[in-house]
Image (cartoon, coloured by chain):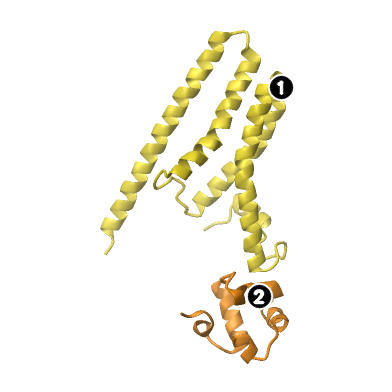
Amino acid sequence: MTTSTLDRVMRWNLDPDGDLYGDERERLRWYEGIAAAAGLQWMALPWAAAVLVWTLGRPAVLPVAVLLVVLYVPMIMSLVYVRRRRVETTPRSYSGKRILITVLSVLPYVLFVLGACYAYRADDADAFRGAAIGAVIGSLLACGKAALDTRRRRRREAAVIGDED
Amino acid sequence: VGRRAAGLTQQDLARQVEVSRQTIIAMETGDYAPSVYLAIKVARALGVTVEQLWGA
């Protein structure tokens, strides 16, 4: 497997061969703590962004959008990284916890976009209604796509199991 | 038990296998399951096998 820029960035960040995080137990605990903090931030910051846009209006839209992008890029990076390391990111099933986390993670982005639309087009009820309908349709399409991907994963895994000795 | 039999303190063993004393304590109390690499290092430092230390 060739080493990509992403691998180098992750390696520098995780410092697996250095002493930035101490010995292997300390490193594991640091990684656990960092993962827990990142997981919370991935949910809390978009919610804060949604609240800020709805309460402060137009002046908050641009700076908060920039912060969301700064938050979003490392999230995508982590997704790309684990996929490149052969981790299947499509859920095998949707438990109550997974559904809750998905809703809590996605909803603030939808609310943020709607808030931004409202902040810029508050005088145009039709435009805002159109954005809201678009958000609902987009969410339904995303749910359909997720269900389809999960079904495909199950079929793929069933085919592999059936193929093994 | 293996460490005491080898006549080593937690600090001695920690120094030999290049981890902190807290990590030795965590392994002894079962709070931390070491990697295969560290388990082998500890076993070698104590002159026993990995199975003797962590086997059922």
What residue is disc 2 on?
B25
Q: Where A109 falls versus B49 (above or below)? A: above
Residue occupying image coordinates x 52% and y 41%: A101
Residue A161, image x, y percentages = 30, 57
Q: Which chain is yellow?
A: A
Hey, which quadrant is residue A145 in on the image? top left
Hey, which quadrant is residue B47 in on the image? bottom right
Alpha carbons under labels 1 and 2: distance apart:
52 Å
What label sits on residue A56 in the rendered view? 1
Amino acid at the residue labelled 2:
Ile
Amino acid at the residue labelled 1:
Leu
As rendered, which of B41 and A12 lies closer to the eye?
Answer: B41
Q: In the drawing, does residue A162 fall left or right of residue A153?
A: left
Q: Where A90 falls versus A127 (above or below)? A: below
Residue A60, image x, y percentages = 71, 24
Q: Where A83 falls versus B48 (above or below)? A: above
* Mark 2, secondary structure of its residue: helix
Instruction: Please tell me the colour of chain B.
Output: orange
Residue occupying image coordinates x 49% and y 39%: A100
Figure quadrant of the N terminus of chain B: bottom right
Q: Is residue B20 visible?
A: no
Q: Residues within 10 Å of mark 1 (few under 14, many from 20)?
A: few
